[in-house]
Image (cartoon, rainbow, N blue to C red):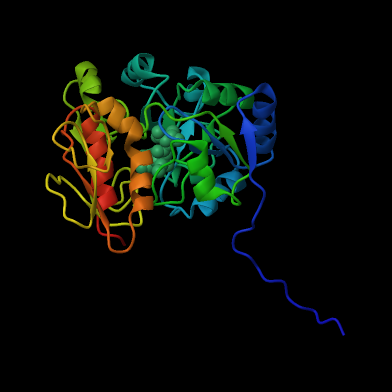
Amino acid sequence: MVANLSRPTLRHMVMETLDLQASDAGIAKAVELLSAGGLVAMPTETVYGLAADASNDTAVARIFDAKQRPMFNPLIAHVADMDVARRIGAFSPMAEAVAQSFWPGALTLVLPIAPGAKLSPLVTAGLDTVAIRMPAHPVAQRLLRAFGGPLAAPSANPSGKVSPTSAAHVREGLAGRIDAIIDGGDCTVGLESTILGLDGPPRLLRPGGIPVEALEAMLGPISAQTHSDRPNAPGQLASHYAPDAAVRLEVTAPKENEIWVGFGSGCEGAVLTLSANGDLVEAAANLFRVLREADSLADRQRQIAFAPVPEHGLGRAINDRLRRASAPRP
Ligand code: TXA
Ligand code: MG
C-alpha cells in the first residue's frame, strides 16, 4: 500500500541559479525574473547586490529568506535616475544638492519616504525613512533602466558573512537560493556605500566607499551614529563580515599560528597584503577578497591577523569592516 507520506518541508527550496552575462539577452532575462518576483544578483561598483522588485512584498521577503537576514534590518532601494528616486524619497534642497554631487556613486541617502511611494514595507522595515542609492556601475544602471522601478538590494551574501565582490563570491554563498547572477566582473570600490542620514541634520550611519571627508567638505562636520545597541542603521550589528577564522587587528608582530595580512611597507613577512604600497583605494578594493583568501588558508588552529590601517579616507570604512569581522560572534 502506498502510504500517504507527508512530504518533507524543505525550509529552503533548492533552485537552479542561472549565470547571466551582462549582455542585452542577459539583462532581458534578469528583468523577466525580477518582474516575476525573482531574486537576481547584480554587480555594483561597491559590492554585488541581491536585487528584487522593491514594490513586491513576496519578492522582498524572499531576499530575507535567501540571506537569512533578520527582518528588522531594512534594505537599500536602488534607482536608475532622480525621477525614480523622487518617487520614493522626499528630497530636501540639501538632499538634492548631495545627490547632484555624489550620484551615481557609492553613497546611500536615508530620507523620509515620499508620500504615495510604492515600496514594500519590508524594504524599510516599517521605518518612515527609506535608504536610496543610485549606483554608477554600467550593468546596474542598464538593469535598473530596463526594469523601470526601484530594486531593493542588500549585499549578495548570507547575512553576517563577508560581502561579495565577484560573481563567483555570490555563487559560493547563495547558489541554489536565488534565481540568477549577472556577471559584471570584479567590483572596483570593494566596500559598501557610505550611508548618510538626511532625514534631519546630516548623520553618518555607515562609513563606506565615499570618504566622509568628501561629504564634510560640502556639508560641514557630520556626526557619526554607528555601533550603538539601538542602531540607526539596524545593519550596524557588532559582528558582521565574519570569516570562519578568528581575526586580530593592529598586528605588527604576528604570532606563529597567524596568517598575517599586510598593509604598506614593514610587512615583509605577510602572506597576503591589502596593498603593498599602502594605497587605501587599492586596499578597499581588495579587502573582502583577501578576507576570503585568508579564511580559506586558515584552519582550526590558525587565525587571521591584520596589520594596522590608517583611520582616514577609505581607511575609516576598512577599519569599520575589520572591527566587525573581529568582533565576538553571537
Ligand atoms: O554598497 C551598498 O550599499 C550595497 C550595494 C548592493 O548597494 N548594499 C548594502 O546593503 O550594503 P546592506 O543591506 O548590506 O546594507 C544596508 C544598510 C543596512 O545597514 C541597513 O540597516 C541600512 O542600510 N538601512 C537601510 N534602510 C535604512 C533606513 N531607513 N534607516 C537607516 N538605515 C537603513
Ligand atoms: Mg551587507
- In depth, the one of 159 and 164 nearer the eye is 164
Above or below: residue 305 compared with residue 189:
below
Residue at the image position 31 percent from the left and 46 percent from the top: 236
Where residue 134 appears, x then y in whole percent? 45, 24
Residue at the image position 33 percent from the left and 44 percent from the top: 291
* Quadrant position of ligand 1: top left
Above or below: residue 307 compared with residue 97:
below
Above or below: residue 56 compared with residue 146:
below
Where residue 84 appears, x then y in whole percent? 52, 23
Quarter of the image where the C terminus is located: bottom left
Residue 227 appears anywhere in the view: no
**How many numbered marks have been drawn onto this rendered protein structure?**
0
Residue 326 appears anywhere in the view: yes
Where residue 323 appears, x then y in whole percent? 23, 47
Instruction: Give the left or right position of residue 122, taking residue 91 as reference.
Output: right
Above or below: residue 292 compared with residue 183:
below
- In depth, the one of 330 and 162 nearer the eye is 162
- In depth, the one of 11 and 225 nearer the eye is 11
Where residue 197 appears, x then y in whole percent? 31, 32
Residue at the image position 12 percent from the left and 48 percent from the top: 253
Quarter of the image where the N terminus is located: bottom right
